[in-house]
Each structure stands twice: as C-alpha cells, then as structure tokens.
Image (tube, rainbow, N blue to C red):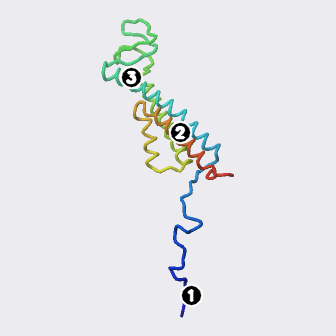
Amino acid sequence: MSQNLPDPADLPAAEDDPRPERKRRSFAGTHQQIRAAAVFYKIAAWITGVMLLLLVVEMILRYGFDVFLYAGGTDLAGGSNVLSLAADGEIIDGFNISIAVLIAHGWLYVVYLLAVFLLWSRMRWGLGQFIAIALGGVVPFLSFFMEAKVHKQVMAELAAHPEAIRRY
C-alpha cells in the first residue's frame, strides 16, 4: 500500500507561506457597545475614586481622632446640631455621615466592579488585566490613573483593529 505523500523537502518553508498564521484580535461587541462600556467604566472609576478618598478621610477621623461626622440631631447639652464632628454617642438622632460614606463606597465599588467586568469582557482581555483594573477601586488615587490608562488602551485597540469589531 503505497501512499503518494509529498517529499518534505518539496514543501514550502514557513517563511515562504503566503498566508502565515497570525493571532487575530477580536472583540465581544460592536464599536458602540465597547465605547458605552468604556464610558460607564470611566464614570464608575471617577465616582469610586472620589468615594475612596472620602473613605480615607473618614478612616483618619474615626481611628486618628475618634470622631464621626454628624448632620442634624441634638447634642448632649440639648443644642441643635447642623453639621459637626463629634465622638460616638455625643449626638442624639443625628445622621452619621461617616457610616453613610462607608456604605456608599461599598455599593459603588460593586458598581465599579460591574463596569470593569463589562469592559473587560467586551475587550476580551486576560484575567490579570481584570484584577489590575479592579484594584483601582481599592487603592487611593489608583482609579484615576487606571481610568486614564484603560481608556487610552481601549481607544488604541479599537483604532488598531477595526476589522475585529463584531457587527450584527
């Protein structure tokens, strides 16, 4: 049983191949969907960054000076309170803005993670990229730098690979 296989010496070399293998870039969405995810990420990054800075100030007030920021209520002497820094228990029926900052930052970080996931999945980046961007909402000031870097990277990749954009 003789097979008519070509001699390996007669086959073209890899550098002679007219269609060399190359890794194709692909995105998981249209141009508009990716830009919308980038804008959502940008807004979430700025809000999360500002809330994180407020959280840092709140932590310094709480653990450095043992005071909370209160709005409204009355103090122990019976006087009305508009806005003040007071130790825990010195303001009665006041709104604790310090606790509100903690809660708001937590929920806004969840929204930030959603924005990161949407952009990450549309761009089809690796897991390391997701983790690096997600850390932007945990380290003070990092979200501002990451937002600028990620926005620049998204726009550069969209411009460099217009053929990779999914069309419906």
Find numbered disc 2 in the image and state the secondary structure of the residue it sits on: helix
Q: Position of residue 30 (x, y in %)?
A: 64, 47
Image quarter where the N terminus lies is bottom right
Q: Is residue 71 above or below residue 116?
A: above
What amino acid does circle 3 point to? Val
Residue drawn at x 59%, y 65% as measured from the top left: 19
- Near mark 1 (Cα within 10 A), the count class, few <14, some 14-19 or many ≥20, is few
Judge from the rendering whether residue 160 lies leftward or rightward of residue 141; answer left or right. Answer: right
- For the residue marked with disc 1, what is the amino acid? Asn
Q: Which callout, 3 or 1, points at the residue further toward the start of the chain? A: 1
Instruction: Give the residue number, with chain letter if any, for mark 2.
Output: 152
In this rendered view, identify the residue nearer to me: 131 or 11. 11
Q: Which residue occupies the foreground of this view, 59 or 162? A: 162
Q: Residues within 10 Å of mark 3 (few under 14, many from 20)?
A: some
Q: Residues within 10 Å of mark 2 (few under 14, many from 20)?
A: few
- Image location of residue 22, percent across then percent down: 54, 60
Residue 9 drawn at (x, y percent): 50, 79
Q: Return the residue at label 1.
A: 4
Q: Measure the alpha-carbon separation of dots 3 and 1.
A: 78 Å
Q: Is residue 113 left or right of residue 57?
A: right
Query: Distance from label 3 to label 2 (Cα)?
Result: 30 Å
Residue type of the residue flagged with mark 2: Lys
Q: Residue at x 55, y 69 (%)?
A: 16
Q: Which quarter of the picture shows residue 23?
A: bottom right
Cα distance in 3D space between marks 2 and 1 = 55 Å
Task: Judge depth for marks 3 and 1 and give the one in front.
Answer: 1
Q: Residue under label 3, please give it.
A: 57
